[in-house]
Amino acid sequence: MVSDPKSIPSGSVLSPETNPAAALAAATGVLTVDLDAIVANWRKLEKTAVPAECAGVIKADAYGCGVAPVARALAGAGCKTLFVATPDEARSARAAVPSAVIYVLNGFFQNCGDAYAKSDAKPVIGDLNELAEWDVFCRRSGWTGGAAIQIDTGMNRLGLTVAEAQGIIPRINAGDHGITLVMSHLACAESLNHPLNSKQLATFREIASLFSGVPASLSNSSGVFLGSQFQFELVRPGAALYGINPTPEADNPMQPVVELKARIVQIRNVERGESVGYGGTWTARRPTKLAVVSAGYADGYFRTAGGSDGTRSAEVIVAGKRCPIAGRISMDLMVIDVTDLPNNAARRGHMVTLIGEGITVDELAHHFGTIGYEVLTSLGPRYARVYKGGAAKSGTDQVAAAAGS
């Protein structure tokens, strides 16, 4: 396990100038990313999608996991195509993986052509105005990097209408059109039998067939598991790479990727009848031992996971056992009921586990009232980022020990 200073967000306790082991020893929270698990998940998705190519979606800093180390790990495993959301993300991805094909999902704007050209990134065009602006840029600059066309088949978010897509078929038939991919996006793929799945499939199959010689892509993470008819020439998994369940109606086929720990900053005792936290919503029903932990909603641990009288809170792992949160989550802190642990099992300075040891991202999302995507992308910059596996295999165990793992 080793830290990757180049991939750590601004504000993290780790920086290129710090000693990693010393920094982790002082860190109030540590997010560990298992690059080997990401690679294993990609390979499982690739195998499921054969013979389609399996790309990797690394937008939003690779779902909070770090775009540079994740992109390098995926490329090392054989992933050739990456998807990001913005030109800035494309620039970061290109710096990490010079040889990748990179698509930018949020489209093309009139004055951003140079950014695409410098990163050798392809815009995903979903509007006729974008297409016209892209054509002007290519004509004036001579850039021949190519672009994708997105067609709206029922998501009603981005994409040409079917009629608009039909209108550019003469351009496709004329050749030298610069379109390297035609794609759409499934709205309800996580629901196996949702009627919109088959409707979108039929619409996309019909229109994509008119894009002669252009590879087609429809499936996101969940779409990969809808069957071969949804896979076309390329699939675009994102969340599943990072351990989020792409089949919520069944067991999760993916390996967990992240482990999140935070440090106990204080142990305190309260008497029966005393309240804990803002609003006094949680009341001790017995003499209670509490551990105050250095993570809160500013770090992406949502306020909705707190405990109050009569409601069940989220839990954390302390000394190998689940312990409930007592009271509301604060900006920087949470309070844990550790009364049932053996004496000295929870002490100041110890790390507790917020994700990992059986607590999944999806479980935490349930307590947050959201989805795993939001959990991962909300994890804040105050956590030290540590990577294990992948390109990090040359690191020493001292870093892992400093992280409290």
Image (cartoon, helix red, strand yellow):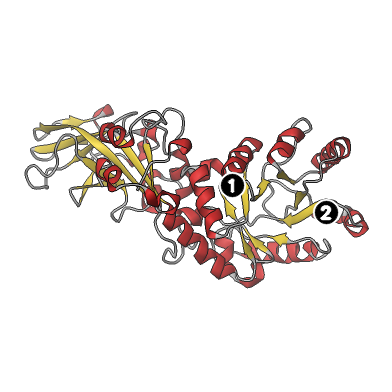
Disc 2 designates what residue?
165
220, 259: nearer the viewer: 259
Residue occupying image coordinates x 63% and y 38%: 91
Residue 311 seen by the camera: no
Comparing labels 1 and 2, the label whose residue is closer to the camera: 1
Three-letter code, disc 2: Ala
View extreme (front): residue: 394
Q: Is residue 17 above or below residue 70?
A: above
254, 270: nearer the viewer: 254
Disc 1 designates what residue?
97
Is disc 2 placed on a helix, strand or loop?
helix
Q: Position of residue 108 (x, y in %)?
A: 74, 39
Which disc is residue 285 wearing?
none
Q: Is residue 50 above or below residue 300?
A: below
Q: Position of residue 397 (x, y in %)?
A: 28, 48
User: Left or right: 195 with respect to 358?
Assistant: right
Q: Is residue 273 above or below residue 171?
A: above
How far is mark 1 from mark 2, CA to CA?
32 Å
Three-letter code, disc 1: Val
- First in sequence: mark 1 vs mark 2: 1
